[in-house]
Image (cartoon, helix red, strand yellow):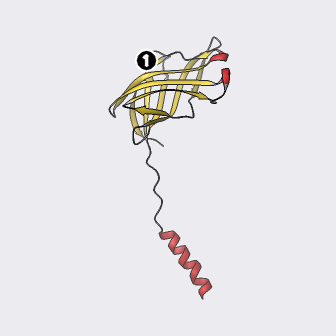
Amino acid sequence: MKHLLFPVLLAVAIMNAPAKEAPPKGTKWEGTISNGMKGDKISFVVSPDGKKLSDLTFSGYWRCSGKLEQTTVGPDSAFNIVGGKVAGVAVDPPNGGSTAWRFEVQGEFSGKAAAKGTFRMNINNLGCDTYKLQWAAAPVGVAK
């Protein structure tokens, strides 16, 4: 009887154990580019504490070796937000040399409702560049 009772009690204990709470998710922001090609967009996630900008993604056009190309890409790394401002450069891969992707973002948050700044993405050795783009963004909901 002991052999049957233990597995049953263990199963009941596991089923009634409190579920681990998922860490709080950040807020997803989406924005438009005012000086790029029509339809260029930027998006990112701001952490719940407002101190990190991550999942930065540019979706739009850039010039690569003289040709206009469409892409959707962003860095793996996050950027610090200090005093309502973000400014930084991410290089992917970090030691990638002249063919590495370079992402530069600067921005200022006006409270929790609006942000604006600049973005540039380039690969020096391949002649690919968005040049400095002006963006404005607003929160759209909880990040997935």
Q: Position of residue 86 (x, y in %)?
A: 43, 28
**Residue at 52% across / 70% down in the picture?**
14
Amino acid type at circle 1 is Ser
Relative to 37, 113 lies left or right: left
Looking at the rendering, in which quadrant would you find the N terminus?
Answer: bottom right
Quadrant of residue 106 within the rendered picture = top left
Q: Which residue is mark 1?
A: 34
**Residue at 59% across / 86% down in the picture?**
2
Q: Residue extending furthest bottom?
A: 1
Q: Is residue 138 above or below residue 12?
A: above
Q: Position of residue 12 (x, y in %)?
A: 51, 74
**Residue at 47% across / 53% down in the picture?**
22
Relative to 64, 80 lies left or right: left
Q: Residue extending furthest top?
A: 66
Label 1: how many Cα within 10 Å (few below 14, some 14–19, many 20+)? some
Quadrant of residue 126 within the rendered picture = top right
Q: Nearer the viewer, residue 22 or 104?
A: 104
**Circle 1 — which element?**
loop
Relative to 27, 122 lies left or right: right
Q: Position of residue 136 (x, y in %)?
A: 40, 24
Q: Position of residue 114 (x, y in %)?
A: 35, 29
Q: Nearer the viewer, residue 43 or 117?
A: 117
- How many numbered discs, if any? 1
